[in-house]
Amino acid sequence: MPDTRAHLKRQILDLLRNNGKTAFRPKEIGKRLSIKDNKRYYLFRNVLSELDDAGLVRKVKGGRFQHQSKRELHGAEGILQMHPQGYGFVTVEGQSNDVFIPATRIGTALDGDRVRVSLAASVRGKRSDRHREAEIVEVLQRGRTRTVGTFDKMGHFAFVKPDDQKLTKDIYIAEENFNGATEGDKVVVSIDTYTDPKASPEGKVLEVLGKADDPGVAVLAVALSQGIKSDFPKEVEKEAADIPLEIPASEIERRLDLRDKAIFTIDPDDAKDFDDAVHIERLENGNLELGVHIADVAYYVKQGTLLDAEAYERATSTYLVDRVIPMLPEKLSNGVCSLRPHEDKLAYSCIMEVSPHGAVKSYEVRETVIHSKQRFTYDEAQAIIDGGTQEHPLKDDVLLAAKLARTLTKKRKRQGSIDFDTAEVKIILDDKGTPVEIVRKDRKEANRLIEELMLLANRTVAEHIGKGRNAKPFVYRIHDRPDAEKIQALRDYVKAFGYQLPTGKDGSVDRKDLNALLEHVKGSPEGAVVQVAALRAMSKAVYSPQNIGHYGLGFGHYSHFTSPIRRYPDLIAHRLLKHYGAGGQSIGEDALEEACDHCSQMERQAVEAERESTKLKVVEYVSEHVGDVFEGVVTGVTKFGVFVEMTRLLAEGLVHVRDMDDDHYEYDERSYTLVGVHTRRTIRLGDPVKVQVAAANVETRKIDLAFAE
């Protein structure tokens, strides 16, 4: 019987149906179906996802799947995601088929709540149940017990308007619960009770952050509203303070001593948490010795401590526009663990013998002690690469590392790795936190140098644990194949710009074709827009003990090993490597799965906080430039207006159709085009335009534009 999708669907459904409520991991299902090679396994995973989308299988805790009949969706549980306009979607637990909740059927549920829903009858002739309508019949658990907002006093009571627009209800505060808040303060407020959908949730002020118009307060509020913790508990700070600075002689004695190596770091000019350092030297056989040395956080942060529990809860450092909220207290992140120059430091090193063509011939993963000889900024390293720095003791080392990195990049691209090079902005703030300038970040060769060497180390340790018969449970960084519908949408989107993206009948895309598209748009006005659209079409990379490879990188095995100061999954990887290296038994996958899910969730929150803090400052900057004209490119055309990205600022705004008074415009949905009835002027995706800033609302973070031509 050939491996058709239909045949695989029948096999999977028969297996799960015949095992009742028993749940299986994907690998267990694949093993029972005798799926062994990677090509068949990828097809199997796609088919399993399709069954999940259709609601025919159910994903339960631990990443396992079980059979599910359609009638089980009545009374199903899930997480509510609200829209600022009052309606919402419930992500039914373990499935991809969200259900739509009209505003009149929300009840007393709030964004992020775990709820029970009842499905409405499906509409005859409707192609898919993907967005079936439902109502919320019960709130099972509040998704959040606090939020951040602006305090609005109204006599003997007040309301707090949440910053998060997905919280569509203001919080009522009785006078005895003001806690010192005054009009216009930005506050942290609890959400205590909400029992009547016609009334407001009730709560109390927990903390006054400061005035809402204070630039620093506004950024902190963004992070807190995303669930990011700021200050460390006193008992955690005390544990960190008690960690000695001096390394015991006995610890140095038992480690591989690399203090004589020409080790250096390359980081941003404002970095203080140096996770990684490198050394490189030629060997007599013509190969290179490459050492990637990572801060040995596991030595200092022990399992079972308050310090470890806090690091796990945070799971990642958060890099806001004006500050870093670290995963570890400053004494560790910027001090004890940081691989600062001219200091002995404990490291966990991946030391590789690499051929001139970029192949790893041998390697060892060892606990080491190092002594960094130089701390380079990216600009300083780039000056050496460009030939601007003639004399430096480590000049030859940097140039050799840069040459190897170029080789690794070319090799990776040849093997199908997708090269996303999305543009980013750097916001220059004054002493008060007010944005005074926005500039594009240059991703120079020095940046790529470090990225490539870290990719190689991450891949090497993942293969060390995951390849062969003795593969053991590990924390992998996985990236699934993109969803077919998203790829088809991307194909149609770039076609409107005049580009072609070949796709298969099943909506699949070859990585080489994606790379060709990204290379083609480089340097064009719409290049940044297409890059972002392509990135959004991809699946999200996550952490998992179930290794399916990394689609974007084209790696069969990949992990995060190189940043344990700022990423908890890297710390888990270090602990597992040490455990297995000492002959420890394989650990259970359930606990590892739970940790991976938590870290993936916290990563998403941190990324959103970082993105929103940048957006806040961009809109704040634009608000001071109302009336100014900027060059841009049309990124979206709808019946209600035209989205334009201002090229220099990488900021998107909307030109409303109602404000386009030079003609009456009609919308052509097939070509994403607005056409003037009288002038026949056309506005389409990719058009270069000049726009004038009409308004910028810092509270909603929206920019209104007008065509300047």
Image (tube, rainbow, N blue to C red):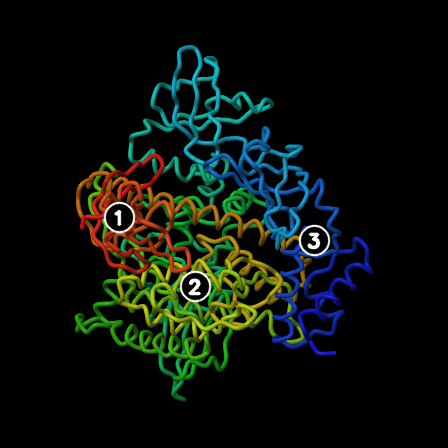
Q: CA distance from mark 3 to mark 1?
A: 45 Å
Q: Judging from the image, what secondary structure is the residue with disc 2 in? A: helix
* Residue shown at 34% from the left, 72% from the top: 519
> Quadrant of the image for the N terminus?
bottom right
Furthest toward the front, the residue is 678
- Identify the residue at image location x=69%, y=56%: 64
The disc at residue 58 is 3
Please state if 692 lies on the left or on the right of 136 as rendered. left
Q: Nearer the viewer, residue 649 or 448?
A: 649
The kind of residue on which mark 2 rests is Asp
Relative to 95, say whether 380 is above or below: below
Q: Amino acid at mark 1?
A: Ile
Q: x, y percentage for residue 665?
A: 31, 49
- Return the mark for residue 427: 1
Mark 3 or mark 1: which comes first in sequence?
3
Identify the residue position indicated by label 2 in the image: 492
Q: In the figure, is residue 251 to the left or right of 116? A: left
Q: In which quarter of the view is residue 407 placed?
A: bottom left
Three-letter amino acid code at the position of disc 3: Arg
